[in-house]
Image (tube, coloured by chain):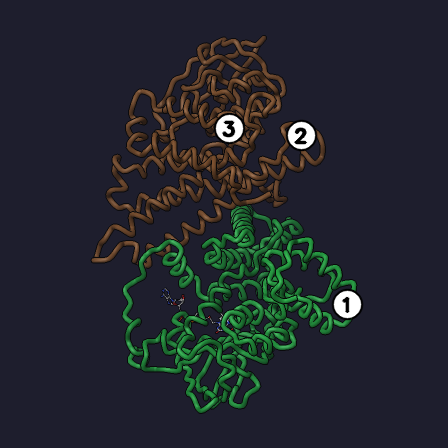
Chain colours: A green, B brown
Amino acid sequence: MKGMSVALDEETIRERAVAFLAGHDPGDRLEFLRARFDAGLAWVHFPEGLGGLGAPRELQNVVERELAGTPQLDTGVQGIGLGMAAPTILTFGTEEQRGRFLRPLWTGEEIWCQLFSEPGAGSDLATLGTRAVRDGDEWVVDGQKVWTSGAHHSRWAILVARTDPDLPKHRGLTYFVCDMHAPGVEVRPLRQITGEAEFNEVFLTGVRLDDSLRLGEVGDGWRVAQTTLMNERVAIGGAPVRRGGGMVGVVAETWRSRPELRTHDLHQRLLRLWVEAEVTRLAGARLREQLSAGQPGPEGSGMKLSFASLNQALSGLDVELRGEEGLGYDDWTFRRSDSVDFFGRGPGYRYLRAKGNSIEGGTSEILRNIVAERVLGLPSEPRVDKDVPWKDLPR
Amino acid sequence: MTLLYTEVEEELRASVRDLLADRCGSDAVLRRVESASPYDMDLWKTLSREIGVAGLLVPEEYGGAGASAREVAVVLEELGRAVAPVPFLTSSVLATSALIGTGDELLGRLAAGEVTVALAVSFAASPYRPAGSVTVRDGVLSGQVRAVAGADVADVLLVPAGGGLYAVDTADATVEAVASLDLTRPIATVTLSSAPGREIAGADVRRALVTGAGLLASEQLGVAEWCLGTTLAYIKERHQFARPVGSFQAIKHRMADLWLDVVRARAAARNAADLLAAVPHIATDAAGAAAAEAGELAAAVAKSWCSEVALRVAEEAVQLHGGIGMTWEHPVHLYLKRAKSTEIALGTPGAHRDALAVLADLPAPA
Ligand SMILES: Cc1cc2nc3c(=O)[nH]c(=O)nc-3n(C[C@H](O)[C@H](O)[C@H](O)COP(=O)(O)OP(=O)(O)OC[C@H]3O[C@@H](n4cnc5c(N)ncnc54)[C@H](O)[C@@H]3O)c2cc1C
């Protein structure tokens, strides 16, 4: 019963998961996922009725263990929805918005993308120029977004647009859910250095969005976007849980199975990177422990930085190590990708795709600024862009 | 297993930190290292007897606290943070670990803080290269060991010779302190000329070196944390070009990278302490052997990573302090010297990485 607080301990959650499994057929993937959401076993830390039980976040592991053999989410394609849109909708959405969006987002019936970056606004996201102008109960959106991963199969997008150009840049922004099927939304693939098109440019021309698609107050878009970005960066993405797993496991496997490739120099570098991978894995494990003990450390801000440089170094070593094979490439075909199949592709692909790790979701330079200022408390550089109306900024 | 600190560990940390704040400030350490007795044996007495750190590793049946490598690691963090000139690592960690499975009578006296012991191997020895140039005949030992840390304040020396380990009264040996790079943990030359030794059956020097290396990583973490914190405070204060020097991005990015290195050093050091704590005193079965191997791997990872991080942060600390960092008066040099010495001590980073070729199954080229 809602409002009544049942002590939600590990055992209770486990029992619920077991009972759920006994009563539902995992054979029908979609029905199974929908029922799982309705049973509050999607993300247990979400409120009741929204796929959760209002339980501590770490108890999700209990559910995952019990339901390990059942249909799983496609975290590649659903990544932006699950990792960024969902926490933002939960924090800023109305009752209606939460009820409308979260279930199909979780089950994967509706895919989400992120319409933040623009040709003129990347690291400096707050300088973005896509306009949203009010027209009665609707907003009319005009502008161009870029590097939009997965826009080609998305039903919805999280969108930040400028609603008041006369205010300083951080204050004139508003956050919307954008209907990717609305007239005026045009998605064009952008070919990446890997050959395929994972991301797109998205042109928004006279796109009409109902005011009910606004997330948060008018002018409060920057604050709402911070929630999205924090969730994006804290996601310990790609962190292997197992010793010697992930990218270092791939290189180690090549090393073990191909003795003829070994040289002393490569050996020294491999051992060095193996140690770095291991300490980075341990730092991730320690961070997860801190989070589940309810003491979120500032360590989260830095993990992505470590993983990016490590992934790049390891994938580079993997290509070099393979010698002649490293001169080849698996597939340059220009095509839309459904998902990032990092480990399923060849070493050349991994090397090239990993280059994006230090750019996507905040560049490594920007993340260093964040660590220095928010974690270490160092002063920011003198700024010239903070109090000037957006329309008067040099560009 | 946990990589976090338990409440008990935090309490232990607090009592050590309080004592050191009171008795082991940087001025005191600077004065001490130039005096005739660079080790602070009064402080050591309080630490070992009143706080009881000397008996942490000693099993309860021999009068110790029956604690584990985890608690020892926390004490080492604090001692590193203060570059405290006390023989905890050499007596309560290295020497005690060598004796742990033996039930020798020294254990009880170590725990009570009655004796200070040193393992008479070079501080530059590693678990992978068996040390020992001392010969033994009918329990009488002869030979010389150089660069022994903590020997000049030890009452008893544990000397590896002829495949065994011998207890030798320091009074029966010649221990000569030498000028040392690390002023806060000076080394000495130990000379034995027909010194009587008592053989200790079942002692394990290799185990001591593995434990010592893995836990030294926690001391290095303490050194790194002090250097990072002190440098941060300084660059927030120090103004040039009408701004704090810590507001320049070239410096902020370096600090962010150092911080990430230290975050990972903490995880690595905690992991080593945790896995070394899980190694049984006498490994007789397969599970014990597996735990010993896991401890060895974790120690190799922690020592190789933390050595380099402590040194990097200490070197950056000197650089970012400018001229003041180059002075004798500012304590940062004590940390640099400690960091540089511990890089070599108990296996260099490279030696530990080489060991991973076997431990992590990454074989060297033929
Ligand atoms: C694979 C991939 C997928 C992406 N997916 C999406 C997506 O789905 N949705 C979306 O909205 N965006 C997405 N992005 C965009 C990404 O967020 C931006 O590329 C990123 O924020 C950088 O912006 P920018 O490309 O304009 O580079 P810029 O901001 O122009 O940066 C250029 C260089 O200058 C450096 N720089 C900039 N400012 C500073 C500063 N203050 N101090 C020091 N250095 C600085 C940067 O670090 C970088 O090296 C994706 C990017 C990639 C590579």
Looking at the rendered structure, the kind of residue marked 3 is Val
Q: Answer few, some or many: residues within 10 Å of disc 1's Cα (few below 14, many 20 plus, some between 14 and 19).
A: some
Q: Which mark is residue B93?
A: 3
Residue at 71% from the left image edge and 35% from the top image edge: B286
B42 above or below A262?
Answer: above
From the image, state whether disc 3 or disc 1 is nearer to you: 1
Q: Secondary structure at mark 1?
A: loop
Q: Are marks 3 and 1 in contact (CB under 8 Å)?
A: no
Q: Where on the image, by quarter, is ligand 1?
A: bottom left
Question: Could you say which is closer to the camera, residue B31 or residue A25?
Answer: A25
Q: Position of residue B207 (x, y in %)?
A: 58, 29
Looking at the rendered structure, the kind of residue marked 1 is His
Q: Answer few, some or many: residues within 10 Å of disc 2's Cα (few below 14, many 20 plus, some between 14 and 19).
A: some
Q: Which mark is residue B283?
A: 2
Residue A346 visible in the displayed image: no
Q: Secondary structure at mark 3?
A: helix
Q: Position of residue A73 (x, y in %)?
A: 66, 68
Q: Is mark 1 within 8 Å of ligand 1?
A: no
